[in-house]
């Protein structure tokens, strides 16, 4: 574990309390109490991996969505009963839990089962959470056995056992008999002056009636007490004594049965003690995990990163102190974040600037965020990266002690001695007002020596100061960075903004003036300054002013650059929209031309359907027209659409080509598939059934796997036997062949057509007796490559041919 004796100074306990607001159970609070900084890199990474999943889970659960498997549902940890003492009692053999204790355990186990189910259903998206869910044992058999036997108030239900139900019915009957007997007694003495009151009551768990003192001889029975005044006696009539005795016996029998039931239920729970204890522990861990996730979402936290040991880096951007932010939120005030970077070449940051300017808050922010990161708590920042520190050592505030005769300077020196004897290269050191409480020159010299020594140890160090010697040291020493907290001269108020690269002015007189010091006293103080001090103050003031101007100018240029980039992006989108519109119009016109061409060609072909010879010529013309139209459409897509497709423009000069991918080649209509890479930027490709060797520069684009062709794995080739068809016409003629021979040839034809990415083919089988046509139809109806088929039109062969549409892969 990390050595963090300064955790109190960094308010780590207050941070725990802030996270604790989001807890719902006593088990979660117990887990939170054990949270502490860790130095084991794998343990820290595991904690933050769980945090990342929990945050994503909550974000997913917060989105409106339809119910489906994998949908995240918020887990509830509020109102969970605290059963830790009951679980400890389960370990003691022979003990029986109270009814309320058993009821609370049942509620807890039922909630644990719900959590297990919810997390398991999201295992695909949240594997770490699912693993935590699976660590909760399946308690359904136990719950089914115990549920509904104990009522919410802890009493045992009547149906908990047959015997208990019988006994309680007997008790009710006995109570009714006693009530009836006493009512008869009341009626008998209602007018003779014996009764003090006309009602039935209880004394010592026995039913009695109130009578007037001195009248007991007229109402024989057992006296069980008297009123405070002595005027009333509570008498159990003789007629009801045996009935009351029977009632007492039944009640005792009920108590014995209740104890037996509680003992039996306790023993059943005791048999599951390890699983119950593990489930309760997991519920506590889940409660803490989701509390951290809720804290992260509420305070806009980030999962921190951790630098490598050989390249340490301390980087925070937009870092905020969570406790300060919580206070400012309630006051509806904004918080100013902190950003800086230290690394192996620059390990020390010296902060200077006005009092109340935020120097100490900056030190505490960095220290607390480092402790949070190594404790597995998300940190409030936009970005955060830390080394894995073995200790966080801090000297913050005034540790003056009258009891120990320690002055401010003595306590400061004692603390510095402890730090210098403890520090290692993996330490984070935070020093507030270094060199304070003594002569400025001597304090500055001491501060320089301390910072220099820490630099030799290669510890990451953040120190605040007002001393000139340290400011000069920060500007001249390699590996040390000066930082200043902003100060607005116009309002005489700090801005709390950290600027790197130059020291800041202390502005003590200006701050004193703003806080109400008399103006004449401030004027005398300024006159008392030496010329050297005034010149230095003026120099620092001018330096800060120029840095502020340079920062504003830099921000202005950055804003202009972003505006230009946005304008350029808008123009590109506008140009793309215009080109897309032009392309759609061109596509629409081409489709219209093709439609008109098809209509006119069809009219022309139908006009020459006269003789058989003319019919044959018409069929040939029809096929040629269809082929021309198809080639025109493919050429249009391969040239015009490709040239205007924004996704294809601006691509890398050299395409990423792997074996097995589909590509489009220059001057080749059919898409090709890369079979293997050759030497010298040469490729062996197969376009249809044409094998080619081409240059990689002849590849126009890599095509997506959308067609029917099957992409073969790398190193796998396909060789087909038997005839190969020319798929330019996409047809097979099986006229005159036997059925078996024709179907075998048709099967091979369809296989090769599917491999060639052909979408539609024509099977010419002739008219004949219809045997071959029927066999072909039956064969096509069950063929895996065939999507659908139908008879050809008159222009494509009529009843003597069948058009087949192939499935897409």
Image: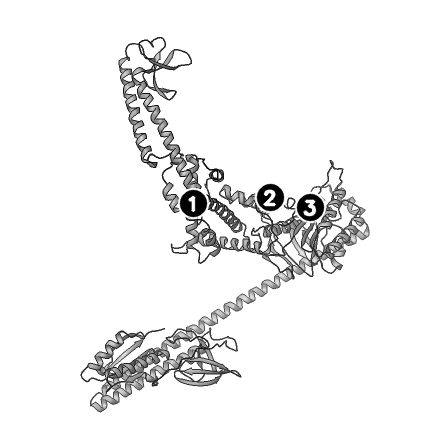
Q: Do the residues labelled 1 and 2 touch (CB within 8 Å)?
A: no
The mark that comes first in sequence, 2 or 3, is 2
Alpha carbon separation for disc pair 3 and 1: 46 Å
Taking the image as shown, residue 42 lies to the left or right of residue 445, namely left
Select label 1 or label 2 by which is in front. 1
Give the image location of residue 761, x and y in percent. Answer: 30, 80
The mark that comes first in sequence, 1 or 2, is 2
Q: Is mark 2 on a helix, strand or loop?
A: helix
Query: Which labelled disc corresponds to residue 13?
Result: 2
Tell me which corner region of the image, top left, top right, bottom left or bottom right, holds residue 172.
top left
Q: Do the residues labelled 3 and 1 touch (CB within 8 Å)?
A: no
Query: Which labelled disc corresponds to residue 221?
Result: none
Give the image location of residue 537, x and y in percent. Answer: 76, 52
Residue hosting label 1 = 111
Taking the image as shown, residue 93 lies to the left or right of residue 528, namely left
Select label 3 or label 1 by which is in front. 1
Residue drawn at point x = 52 percent, y = 78 percent: 654
Give the image location of residue 344, x and y in percent. Answer: 68, 60
Residue drawn at point x = 28 percent, y = 19 percent: 181
Residue hosting label 3 = 396
Q: Please state, as top left, top right, bottom left or bottom right, where the C terminus lies in the image.
A: bottom left
Tell me which corner region of the image, top left, top right, bottom left or bottom right, holds residue 166.
top left
Residue drawn at point x = 76 percent, y = 37 percent: 405
């Amino acid at each position: 574990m990390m050595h963090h004796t300064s955790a109190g100074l960094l308010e780590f306990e207050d941070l725990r309390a802030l996270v604790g607001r989001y807890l719902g159970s006593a088990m979660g609070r117990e887990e939170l109490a054990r949270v502490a900084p860790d130095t084991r890199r794998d343990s820290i990474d595991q904690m933050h991996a769980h945090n990342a999943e929990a945050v994503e889970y909550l974000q997913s659960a917060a989105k409106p969505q339809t119910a489906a498997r994998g949908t995240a549902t918020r887990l509830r940890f509020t109102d969970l009963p605290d059963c830790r003492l009951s679980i400890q009692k389960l370990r003691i053999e022979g003990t029986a839990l109270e009814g309320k204790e058993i009821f609370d355990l049942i509620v807890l186990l039922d909630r644990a089962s719900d959590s297990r189910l919810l997390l398991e259903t999201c295992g695909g998206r949240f594997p770490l959470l699912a693993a935590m869910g699976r660590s909760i044992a399946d308690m359904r058999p136990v719950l089914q056995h115990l549920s509904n036997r104990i009522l919410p108030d802890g009493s045992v239900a009547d149906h908990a056992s047959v015997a208990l139900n019988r006994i309680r019915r007997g008790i009710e009957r006995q109570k009714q008999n006693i009530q009836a007997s006493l009512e008869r007694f009341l009626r008998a003495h209602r007018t003779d002056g014996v009764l003090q009151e006309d009602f039935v009551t209880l004394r010592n768990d026995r039913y009695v009636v109130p009578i007037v003192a001195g009248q007991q001889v007229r109402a024989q029975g057992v006296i069980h007490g008297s009123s405070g005044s002595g005027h009333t006696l509570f008498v159990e009539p003789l007629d009801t004594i045996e009935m009351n005795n029977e009632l007492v016996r039944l009640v005792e029998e009920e108590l014995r049965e209740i104890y037996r039931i509680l003992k039996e239920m306790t023993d059943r729970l005791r048999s599951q003690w390890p699983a119950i204890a593990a489930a309760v522990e997991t519920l506590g861990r889940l409660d803490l995990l989701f509390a951290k996730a809720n804290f992260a979402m509420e305070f806009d936290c980030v999962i921190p990163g951790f630098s490598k040991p050989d390249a340490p880096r301390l980087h925070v951007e937009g870092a905020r102190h969570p406790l300060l932010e919580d206070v400012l939120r309630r006051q509806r005030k904004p918080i100013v974040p902190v950003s800086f970077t230290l690394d192996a070449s620059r390990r020390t940051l010296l902060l200077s600037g006005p009092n109340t300017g935020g120097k100490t808050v900056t030190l505490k922010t960095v220290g607390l965020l480092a402790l949070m990161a190594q404790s597995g708590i998300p940190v409030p920042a936009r970005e955060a990266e830390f080394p894995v520190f073995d200790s966080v050592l801090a000297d913050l505030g005034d540790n003056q002690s009258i009891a120990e005769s320690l002055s401010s300077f003595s306590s400061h020196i004692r603390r510095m001695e402890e730090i210098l004897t403890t520090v290692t290269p993996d330490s984070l050191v935070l020093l507030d007002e270094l060199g304070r409480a003594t002569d400025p020159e001597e304090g500055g010299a001491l501060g320089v020596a301390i910072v220099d020594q820490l630099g030799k140890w290669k510890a990451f160090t953040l120190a605040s100061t007002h001393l000139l010697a340290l400011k000069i040291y920060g500007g001249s020493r390699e590996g040390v960075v000066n930082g200043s907290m902003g100060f607005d001269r116009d309002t005489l108020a700090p801005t709390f903004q950290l600027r790197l690269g130059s020291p800041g002015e202390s502005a003590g007189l200006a701050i004193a003036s703003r806080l109400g010091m008399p103006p004449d006293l401030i004027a005398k103080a300024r006159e008392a300054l030496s010329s050297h001090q005034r010149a230095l103050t003026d120099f620092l003031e001018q330096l800060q002013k120029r840095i502020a101007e340079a920062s504003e100018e830099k921000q202005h240029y950055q804003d202009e650059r972003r505006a230009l980039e946005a304008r350029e992006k808008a123009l590109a989108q506008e140009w793309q929209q215009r080109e897309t519109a032009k392309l759609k119009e061109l596509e629409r016109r081409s489709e219209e031309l093709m439609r008109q061409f098809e209509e006119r060609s069809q009219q022309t072909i139908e006009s020459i359907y006269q003789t058989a010879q003319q019919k044959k010529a018409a069929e040939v013309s029809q096929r040629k027209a269809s082929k021309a139209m198809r080639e025109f459409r493919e050429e249009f897509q391969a040239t015009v659409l490709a040239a205007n497709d924004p996704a294809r423009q601006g691509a890398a000069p050299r395409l990423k080509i792997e074996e097995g991918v589909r590509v489009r080649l220059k001057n080749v209509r059919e898409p090709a598939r890369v079979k293997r890479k050759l030497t010298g930027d040469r490729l062996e490709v197969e376009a249809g059934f044409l094998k080619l060797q081409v240059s990689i520069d002849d590849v126009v684009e890599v095509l997506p796997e959308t067609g029917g062709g099957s992409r073969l794995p790398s190193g796998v080739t396909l060789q087909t036997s038997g005839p190969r068809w020319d798929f330019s016409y996409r047809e097979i003629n099986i006229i005159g062949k036997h059925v078996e021979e024709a179907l075998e040839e048709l099967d091979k034809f369809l296989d090769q057509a599917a491999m060639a990415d052909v979408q539609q083919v024509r099977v010419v089988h002739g008219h004949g007796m219809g045997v071959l046509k029927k066999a072909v139809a039956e064969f096509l109806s069950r063929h895996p490559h065939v999507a659908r088929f139908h008879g050809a039109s008159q222009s494509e062969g009529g009843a003597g041919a069948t058009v087949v549409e192939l499935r897409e892969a």
